[in-house]
Each structure stands twice: as C-alpha cells, then as structure tokens.
Amino acid sequence: MTLVYVVAGEASGDVLGARLIAALRARRPDLRFAGIGGPRMAEQGVPSLFPYGELALMGLLEVLPRIFRLKRLLADAVADVAAKRPAVLVTIDSPGFTLRVAERVRPLGIPVVHYVAPQVWAWRPGRVVKLRQKVDRILCLLPFEPVFFESAGIPVTFVGHPVLESGADAGDAARFRAAHALPEADRPVIVMPGSRRMEVSRLLPVFGAALRLAEQRLPGLRPVVPVAPIVAEAVRHAAADWPVPPILVEGNDAKHDAFAAVAASGGAGLIKSGTSSLEMAVAGIPHVVAYRVNPVTAAIVRRLVKVPHASLVNLLAEREVVPERIQEACTPEALAETLLRPMLEPDVAAAQRAGFAESLAKLRAPEGLPSVAAAEAVLRMLERGSAA
C-alpha cells in the first residue's frame, strides 16, 4: 500500500491535513497515512508522532528558550520519515518546522509537496531561491502567489483557500443562544486571540482592556472566545478578571454557531491578524484586525515586510476594508473605538461586508473545493512518482 506522510505544525494545519487525507482516501482507498498533526488528523486515523502543540511557537525570543527541544523534534520527524519511506511527503504551513523537515528529507528522493505557500512574498522575497531547493511543488491558497513562485522556477498549483469550505457561514444563531442561555438583550462579540500560547499571553490582556472600555459605551456586550484545545486553559486564566465573563467555545460547530449569533445580532469581532480575518469575512462579521509581538521581533519584522497590509482581506481587496491596529496602534483605546464603529454605524458595517464579497471572490479556484484540488495535486505527484 502507498504511504503518504503528512506533517502539520499547528491547529490550522491539522484541519487542512484532515481534509486532505479525507479527500485523498475518497479517491484512493488503498492509501496509508502517517505523520504529525493534531486531533483532526487523529480523527482520520493518523496518530501524531509527537504532540504537535510543542511546535506552536512564534517570534524570535519566544523560540529561543525551546531551541534544543525543537531540534530534537526535528530530528525525530526526519528519522521517522526516513524509516517509513513514504511515496510523498506533504508538509503543511508552519514553515519554520515543516520546511526544515522537507529540506532534510529531500536528498532521500522522496517527493515533497508543501501545502500553504510561505509568505516570502510578504517579507524576505529573496528566500524563494532556497525554497526551490526544498520542495517539488507548492499548493497555493492565494491567487497572486502562483506568479511569484513560478517566476522562481517552483511548480505551483492554486487550490483555493480552505476558508471557503470551513462552514464559517453555516452556524445556527438560535442554537448558540439557547446553549449559553444568552439573553436577547446581550450582543455577542467574537474575540479571537490566536492558537499559540505566546499570542494568547500577549494579546488577551489588551483585548480584555479594550472590551472593558467598549462595554462602558455599549452595555450588553458579551465576549465569545473560540479556543483551540492547546490554549484553552491559558485563555481561561487570562480572561478570569474580565468584567463580563466570556463564553469560551471549542470545536468548529460551536464556533460557527457563535459566528452566526454575532452576525445576526449586529455584533463585531476583535481578531488576531491571520486566517481568522477571512473566517470573519465568510461569516459576514465586521471586525478589527490586531496584533502585537515582542518589540525586538517587531523591529526586525518591520525591516523585512514588503506588503502594505496585515489582513488577508485587505491584501486581496488591495485596500483597507478591515481596520488594522498593529503593534503600537494595538492599544485598548484604539481597539475599543474601532470595534464599536460597525456596531454603532450601519454604513461602516455595510462597507466592510461589501469588501468581504470582493475579497472572497478572488479565493475560488476553478477545480472546486480546495481540499479536492489539493488532493488531485498530490495524486498527480504520486502518479509521476510511480511512473518514474
């Protein structure tokens, strides 16, 4: 039986890996799978070599204390791939780890497909040359990425963005309100601080202070925080002193029900920069994008960033659809003011939603669902490998 080895380093990659495995298995029931992932891949019958939460780190100063442990995990991953000799290795996002695995495995002659193009087009574009030496094909999520990578000689397939099949727009608002006994007068707002512990520890205090200010101006706000299992306890601890106790939800169904309740009540979102902004766009929730990292990390990143926006919604629209409050601008006062605007001014909310439709239209690939397009690309790699 043909073995496909899948490496995902965080919660979003775990979801992509699970969908990819399901789509591959539907087309090739004979395939076997192994790898590194989380609960979603485990549901597909793929136990993880080690807990993938150990890889969920971000920022130069955050990684340094764990550097020796990360090196050990890298060596373990490479050794496992080498021992199992899969027909193809699929690395998913988390380039700091997954591409190091790819680089060390490539000399073994195992084809490498990297799913989710590293954003070298946004910062350090010169690194694309090194990327060409690590992977055989990239599966891109964004429509402007293929030209960039193809110009560097890297084969690319645009598969569309997985947020389009996330179900973020398919929740049940009434079910959410009933499940949490939420009074009709309460207006839920979505708070998404990220799936990494360092993000949560850095963002939730300022998010909590912003919500405290916002609630003073608009009583009845009720924060709802979707949490990944690896940060659930950290979120509970950080939100313990909030004036209005947050509703914590786990799992996609509960999260999407929360989205529906927020959208139906005219709420808004306070969102970490990243894919979460696209989820808000699919759900039709106006929001503000925020981010804050260690000042040293921020100073380094500012020298490297080559794009005008942090939000993917804004990058796709080529203008600021969603307000961004990054680093020094990520203050409680600024976040509270920006969060309240679409709830108090209908024209602001309507303008954001119009921009969402414009951005999301660019994410659709012609081949259909992103997971199906990704599976077809991996199968083509397998066919070429067997022919060789």
Image (spheres, rainbow, N blue to C red):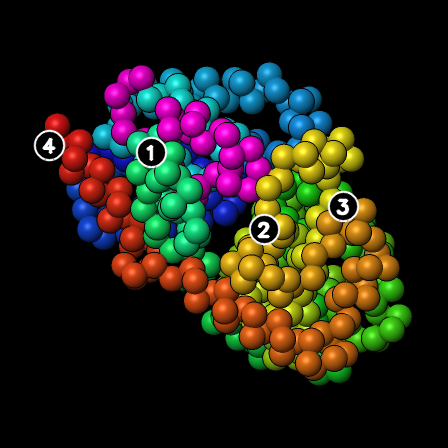
Dot 2, crowdedness within 10 Å: few (<14), some or many (≥20)? some
**Coordinates of residue 59 in the picture (x, y in percent):** 66, 33
Do the residues bearing badges 2 and 1 touch, measured as CB atoms within 8 Å? no
Estimate the spatial distance between the alpha carbons at disc 2 and disc 1, rounded to whole Å: 27 Å
Extreme front residue here? Answer: 151
The residue wearing badge 4 is 387
The residue stretch that appears in magenta: 107-134
**Looking at the rendering, in which quadrant would you find the C terminus?**
top left
In the depicted structure, whether residue 270 falls above or below residue 347: above
Tell me where residue 311 appears, x and y as whole percent.
60, 55
Q: Which mark is residue 341?
A: none
Calculate the distance from the C-alpha at mark 1 to the C-alpha at mark 3: 35 Å
User: Which residue shows up at 33% across the image and 33% down it?
Assistant: 153
Q: Mark 2 or mark 1: name the one nearer the start of the chain.
A: 1
Mark closer to the chain start, 4 or 1: 1
| Viewer-side label of 4, 1 | 1
- Residue farthest along the left direction in this orientation: 387
Q: Which residue is mark 3?
A: 327
Q: Is residue 115 magenta?
A: yes
Measured from the top left, where is residue 265 in percent x and y?
Answer: 66, 79
